Structure formats: structure tokens, C-alpha cells
Amino acid sequence: MNTQGLTVNPAFLRALNRLRDVADTAFASGDAGVHFELMAKPARDVMKTHLVIDGQQLEYFNQKERWQRFSWPDEQWQPGASLSWTSTQNMERILADFRGSWSFIRLLEQAQVTQLDSSSFMLQWQAPDGLPLHYLMRVEQGKGPLALLALKNYRLPGQVFLTGKAISDAEEYRDNADE
């Protein structure tokens, strides 16, 4: 994009758009935070799962499934996230236990995520004994808290404006992208 003799780096614009997408989700209500619902799903040989997100708990004993609303970060300010399970073979074991403001995002990083539709995702964690721990997530906007995973290893390009050969490379990229 050439404006009054300056060529803006297209990679910089793409990076800003990526940040905007995350901000649209994380600041949807004006304050930093997201609201979503989780539902634990049964799994063979798993008797119980226990998920804690900032002090909010979802304990599931293979009973009737139900949605439970969560906020992240929670207003109680008990930053932490943990996931444990009890199998038919073992006592309760901890899969993950994180402390700190970004602990829930660290827990989400460990999940295999499958998008089911525009607002629902299947989260699966693999326990060390091979058992899958399944949760459905329903979000209010975008990808909900999963949008924050896009910030992992995020870096803005080193240049906002291009000069010299970088300008012709950017114009060639733009021309090829239009085809």
C-alpha cells in the first residue's frame, strides 16, 4: 500500500489485522475477558473429570451432561487452571496444573481442538494413560478464549514501511495475490 510516497509493509498490516481479530474477541464487552460454556463428555474408562479455571469448577461423574458458564479471567481473581481425572484403573490423577494469569490459555494449548460449527469446539486432552478427556466449548463471539492462542509466538514485523527492493517485492506479492 503506497500512500504519499510511503509503502506500508503488507506483513505489518496482516499482523495488525490478526491483533484486531483477537481484540474483537477478548474485548467484546469493553473489558478484557471472554465468556463461554463448557460441557464435559463421557469417555470409556474415565469415571470422573475435574476442571478448574480461575476458581470456577466443573466436576463431571459420567452423569447427565450439562453446560456450565465460565468467564476468563474470572472476577474472583484466583488465577489458575487444572484438569484431573479418575479412571476405572487409577485414583485421581492430575493432567495439568498451571498458576498465573495465563494458566487457562496454557491448558488450552495442550488440547487438541476441533471446530464443530461457528460457535462450538471439541477440546480433547490425552491423559498419560491414553484415556481421552473430552469437553465441548460453546463461545459467544469468534473463537472465544481459543482466539488468544493466535498470540503464541506472535511478533510484529520489524518494518512498518518498506524501502528499496522490499517495495518491489511487496508489489510483486500483491500482484500475484490478486490473480
Image: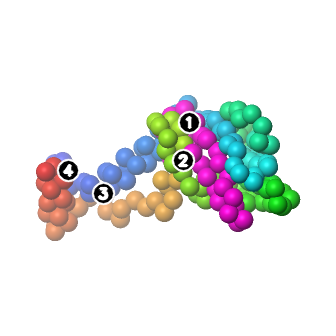
Q: Tell me the residue that label 1 is attached to.
A: 139
Mark 2–mark 4 Cα distance, whole angstroms, equals: 31 Å
Q: Tell me the residue that label 2 is attached to.
A: 146
Q: Amino acid at mark 1?
A: Val
Q: Nearer the viewer, mark 2 or mark 4?
A: 2
Q: Tell me the residue that label 4 is attached to.
A: 1
- Across and down, in percent, residue 112 comes to 56, 55
Considering the numbered disc 3 on the image, is that residue within a helix, a strand or a loop?
Answer: helix
- Please tell me how crowded label 3 is: few (under 14), some (14-19), or many (20+) other residues with Cα within 10 Å: some
Total labels drawn:
4
Disc 1 + disc 2, Cβ < 8 Å: yes
Q: Tell me the residue that label 3 is attached to.
A: 11
At horizontal 43% and vertical 43% (from top left) the residue drawn is: 21
1 or 17: nearer the viewer:
17
Which image quarter: residue 62?
top right
Mark 1–mark 2 Cα distance, whole angstroms, equals: 9 Å
Magenta residues (range): 122-148
Report if residue 97 lies within the magenta region: no
Q: Nearer the viewer, mark 4 or mark 1?
A: 1
